Amino acid sequence: MRKFLILASVAAMAVPALTITLTPVEVSASARGCRNTGTALGGVGGAVIGSNLASGGGRTGGAIIGGLVGAVAGHEIAKSNCDPDRTTYRAACRNETRYRNHRAYDVRVCQGRDGVWRAV
């Protein structure tokens, strides 16, 4: 009976995750909605994992701690992945050999957003 209840609760928690996953991208296009979804899914997943990892009578405490950690992790992951205003910038870098007092030394030089190469 206990295994049946665990399987039923996992299946009940999987249904919202599947519906969110299968919804079109245009429906959850806002960054706030995406972060909220990540927080909710992380909290539920963390609670399930924390409850299963806790032993004995501490299952409730494990579920609470796991839910909090999962919610924070889900929010941070969603924030870095779902923000439409986020623009990624990849700096071009190279190594150069420069000379001082007739001695060579290597310098790492990267191109900034303004196009100017600067030593890092």
Image: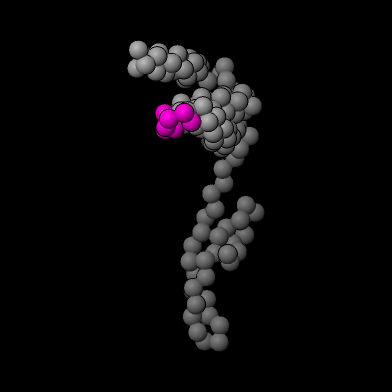
Q: Is residue 51 visible?
A: yes
Q: Residue at x 61, y 56 (%)?
A: 112
- 106 up-or-down from 20: above or below: below
* Residue 18 in the image, given as x and y percentages of width and height: 45, 17
- The answer to which of 87 and 67 lies nearer the viewer is 67
Q: Is residue 42 visible?
A: no
Q: Main secondary structure of the magenta part?
A: helix
Quarter where residue 73 is shown: top right
In this figure, what is the number of numbered marks? 0
* Residue 98 in the image, given as x and y percentages of width and height: 52, 76
- The answer to which of 22 and 68 lies nearer the viewer is 68
Query: From which residue to which does the magenta span run?
Result: 52-58
Residue 95 part of the magenta-drawn span: no
Q: Residue at x 54, y 64 (%)?
A: 109
**Quadrant, the C terminus:** bottom right
Q: Residue at x 51, y 27 (%)?
A: 60
In the picture as drawn, the residue positioned furthest to the front comes out as 57
Image position of 86 (left or right of 17) = right
Q: Residue at x 52, y 66 (%)?
A: 108
* Residue 35 in the image, given as x and y percentages of width and height: 59, 29
The colour scheme is one colour
Residue 56 part of the magenta-drawn span: yes
- The answer to which of 25 and 57 lies nearer the viewer is 57
* Residue 100 in the image, given as x and y percentages of width and height: 56, 83
**Quadrant, the N terminus:** top left
- The answer to which of 109 and 68 lies nearer the viewer is 68
